[in-house]
Image (spheres, grey):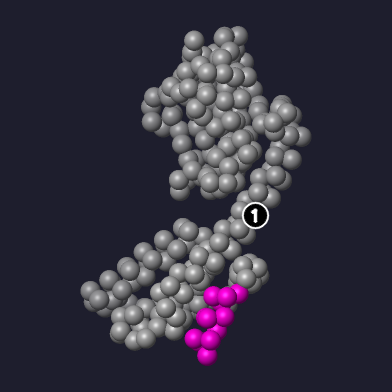
Amino acid sequence: MIRKTILLLIIAPLATFAQNAKKAPVKQPINSFVLKNGMDTASYAFGLKIATDLKNRGVDSLNYSIWSMAMQQVFENKKPEISQEQAQKVITLFMSSREEENSKTIIAEGDKYLAENKTKPGVVTTNSGLQYIILKMADGRKPKPDAEVTVHYKGTLLNGKQFDSSYDRGEPLSLQLSKVIPGWSEGVQLMQEGSKYKFFVPWKLGYGPQGAGGDIPPYSVLIFEIELLNAGK
């Protein structure tokens, strides 16, 4: 029965995975336990590491008994219910479905945030959709589109998580405006040397559908506080 059920998953369309992903499995209570020896501790450590890696990739729950059975079959050299090739197809479809659902959620949250944010006092929205607030006025020079500028900045996600900060590193950053994300290029050109702005960057002006490393998820709205120290030549 298990073999038949899993094989059906392989040929099921992606929509089936999207529907199933919405149904949170019932979590069984976890009994308290004691790590009695080195094998117990190593077993727990491997489980912890594998589960953490999966969770970081967007998998928030699995059928734990089936997961345990699959590992036991491998370690005991028993014939698995599906082949390695079939398993890879299932994983690919499953992860694609989860990523699609997660992306829709992130986009919806970002759109809602920006729609509400643009109505707040002091927020200016440009034709591209970039939003900003002037935190500190100045009357210095404005940078040119290809200028190499020097800035202090910090960047956060909508949940407040900081992903980068020149302040924390203790030194400003010099960069060329023609080689940064569109939101930065457009925004910094609005600034005058000595000023400080807060920018709200839509995903289309940020890192887009690919995100950036493990810190910035795809389709993320980004918030930057930027202080223009030198407008370049």
Q: Position of residue 126 (x, y in %)?
A: 71, 27
Span of residues in magenta: 1-12
Q: Position of residue 43 (x, y in %)?
A: 31, 74
Query: In percent of the image, x 34 and y 80: which residue is there?
Result: 74
Relative to 146, say whether 80 is above or below: below
Relative to 3, say whether 67 is above or below: above
Q: Is residue 136 left or right of residue 35?
A: right
Q: Quadrant of residue 31?
A: bottom left
Kind of residue at badge 1: Thr
Query: In percent of the image, x 71 and y 46: which residue is there?
Result: 112
Q: Which residue is mark 1?
A: 105
- Camera-side residue: 190 or 36? 190
Whether residue 10 appears in magenta in the rendering, the answer is: yes
Q: Decide: few, some or many residues near mark 1? Use Cα within 10 Å; few <14, some 14-19, many ≥20.
A: few
Please say whether residue 194 is visible from this viewpoint.
no
Q: Quadrant of residue 144?
A: top right
Q: Position of residue 76 (x, y in %)?
A: 30, 85
Q: Is residue 226 left or right of residue 166?
A: right
Q: Is residue 60 left or right of residue 109?
A: left
Q: Quadrant of residue 141?
A: top right
Quick one: SS at disc 1?
Answer: helix
